[in-house]
Amino acid sequence: MTDLIRIEDTPKYLGQTVKIGAWVRQKRGSGKIAFLQLRDGSGFMQAVASESELPEEVFKVAEHIKQETSVYVTGVIQENPRDDFGFEMALKDIEVVGQSEDYPITPKEHGTEFLFENRHLYLRHLKPYAIIKIRNTIIKATYDFFYDNGFTKIDAPILTGSAPEGTSELFPVEYFEQQAYLSQTGQFYGEAGAMAFGRVYTFGPTFRAEKSKTRRHLTEFWMIEPEMAWMHQDESLEIQERYISSLVQAVLDNNQAELKMLDRDPKTLEKYTQLPYPRISYDEAIEMLKKADFEIEWGEDFGSPEETYLANQFDKPVFVLNYPKAVKAFYMKRHPDRDDVVVSADLLAPEGYGEIIGGSERDTDLDYLVERIKQEGQDPATYEWYLDLRRYGSVPHSGFGLGLERVITWVTGQEHIREAIPFPRTLNRLWP
Ligand code: ATP
Ligand code: MG
């Protein structure tokens, strides 16, 4: 038996006879010729079965093959300039490995509900394939970027006993005799890590009981949360834009075929690798919105129509700096010259994708933090270990949180964030 090769490697075997293990996505043609659309996880390729060149039994198998049957195909690799991949197989032999009767996702159009009810099968299709491949690139580029920039990965726990931003969006879990929650941020652990390792990041699943149905919210998503000691906000913003640019560049370098499958124009993405990104203040943002007749007053947080409008005024991601203290978390650093805003920044993605990063410099003062915790109606005792970070060698530090699926949705140009994760969890989806 010849060794199996993978579809992505077939160009190296031009003119040779090879064997591939694959699934049949579709069969086209009839009568004297059958075109089998194959996929093997590494790529997509067509095999051509022609009646005149094949033993009768072999042609019959090819001609009657059903969608998603798994097969070994043997044949000669040849060029096909009309095909996106550029290569195809002239079939010599085919052996069925696993039958597939009545595969539910037929070539006709299906609704989103149906496709996600069948996500375990839908993952095999072109669009999910391309998006998850790009996700894979973005994950690798994340590890590379932080490794190359002197960060240590600190894994934050997923089961926590504390509720840093209030309990309303938390999923409670029973933890023996105690109440625990699924983590909605690893930030505090990141801050502890930064005091030990200087520059750290957490990267893990994050859980939020988001009760609203939006195109941007999952109840389980993956977040990357860098935290840097001895760093002020300006430098943090530079890291953020360099990080985003490196992610987009990695996709351009590795996923041209996938971008094409998604009809995503690489030229659009190329703009996003050009630094710096514009920076506007929250005050300026409010002015822009008012001029555009939004009903918004200074002090209010932005909803997605506001974020979309603001982002659309720029052709690159835009930082919105220094939000009102009242709408941001208690740990954000006070502005040196103003009492009403904090040293924060949200990064808004262009094309209507909204916030992809939220970050800030962290306040270093113990008494101020205790006061702010009380103002929020919370008990400082819950934050004892976190406050220790201010008791023992507090230093200037900054950090941010980036939602992996938000970035993927934007980079791949999808309508809805559920496309950006293999098995999405939303308000009404816990299956499959
Ligand atoms: P939003 O206002 O959009 O709900 P947030 O202010 O709650 O965002 P942060 O708490 O700052 O967001 O979280 C950091 C990042 O995590 C966000 O910038 C976003 O990219 C991502 N994120 C937040 N909530 C979700 C969610 N429910 N699903 C997917 N990604 C999310
Ligand atoms: Mg939120």
Image: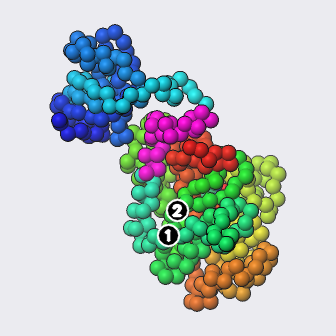
Left or right: where 69 falls relative to 322:
left
Q: Residue at x 45, y 41 (%)?
A: 130
Question: Can you give x and y, in whole percent of width and height, for residue 65 in the image?
Answer: 37, 21
In the displayed structure, 8 sits above or below 224; it is above
Left or right: where 357 falls relative to 292:
left
Q: Residue at x 80, y 48 (%)?
A: 293
Question: Can you give x and y, in whole percent of width and height, for residue 91 in the image?
Answer: 25, 23
In the displayed structure, 112 sits above or below 195; it is above
Left or right: where 117 falls relative to 14:
right
Task: Please provide the residue range marked out in magenta.
Answer: 112-136
Which image quadrant: the C terminus? top right
Residues at marks 1 and 2 touching, judged by CB atoms closer than 8 Å: yes
Q: Amino acid at mark 1?
A: Asp
Q: Dividing the image into four equal quarters, which quarter contains ligand 1?
A: bottom right
- Whether residue 161 is in magenta: the answer is no
Q: Amino acid at mark 2?
A: Gly
Q: Nearer the viewer, residue 219 or 318?
A: 219
Kindly identify which residue carries mark 1.
155
Left or right: where 358 falls relative to 261:
right
Kindly identify which residue carries mark 2.
204
Q: Nearer the viewer, residue 13 or 171?
A: 171
